Image (cartoon, grey):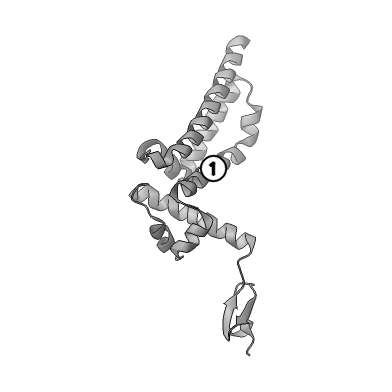
Amino acid sequence: QPSSRAMYPTAGRKMTWKKGRPFRARKTKQEAEETKENILSAALDIIYKKGYARTTFVDIAKEIKLSKGAVYWHFKNKPDMFLALGRQMEDKIETTLHDVFYETQTLDDFKQMLFKMILLIAQDEQLRKYYSIVFYRMEWTDELLSMKKFFDQHDEYMVQWSVEILRQAQLEK
């Protein structure tokens, strides 16, 4: 049999032969993670354009030239995928502003943190789309209740944290 590398060049993935046909080895963890990121990015764009309710896994798969099954392999359903998208966006903000969050002690620190967060969202297209969807375009249906709880818990934490910073600032006056 001819060398599989010569006939079917792959980006470093090993190709083997099964039943006389080339058979591609499973994706590496890194490749699977990249596929998941691509799915989330495509989902964000499509949900932003069409709305959550009108977006399907087929739409997402077509956008990035995958099968619907490949999308289901990464996410069990649309709420699961949107929750992963939410966590990704929240992680993006926390990672970028980590030091600012945990060093905020005074009212001036708090103002700086809010300014940096607003600036980050203004400069990052994905964050702008995501927050536009969540705050202005989302249809909160029964299937999304677990996701809404996630957002509500996060919001409650941020409110409590903000109130504590403001109380400390008031005590310092």
Q: Toward the viewer: 132 or 108?
A: 132
- x then y, percent, for residue 104: 63, 26
Q: Which residue is mark 1?
A: 87
Q: Residue at x 47, y 63 (%)?
A: 69
Q: Residue at x 38, y 58 (%)?
A: 59
Residue 132 versus residue 75 in the image, above or below? above
Using a 10 Å C-alpha cutoff, classify the residue at mark 1 as few (fewer than 14 neighbours), some (14 to 19) or many (20 or more).
some
Given the image, on which type of amino acid does mark 1 rest?
Arg
* Quadrant placement of the C terminus: top right
Residue 63: quarter of image = bottom left
63 relative position to 25: left or right: left
- x then y, percent, for residue 37: 53, 55
Residue 9 visible, this orientation: no
- x then y, percent, for residue 107: 58, 19
66 relative position to 24: left or right: left
Residue 109: quarter of image = top right
7 relative position to 40: left or right: right
Q: Residue at x 56, y 39 (%)?
A: 93
Query: Disc 1 on helix, strand or loop?
Result: helix
Q: Toward the viewer: 74 or 128?
A: 74
Q: Toward the viewer: 126 or 138?
A: 138
Residue 1 versus residue 173 in the image, above or below? below
Residue 30 versus residue 149 in the image, above or below? below
How many labels sit on residues? 1
Residue 106 versus residue 69 in the image, above or below? above
* Quadrant placement of the N terminus: bottom right
Residue 147 visible, this orientation: yes
- x then y, percent, for residue 125: 46, 46
Q: Residue at x 44, y 50 (%)?
A: 78
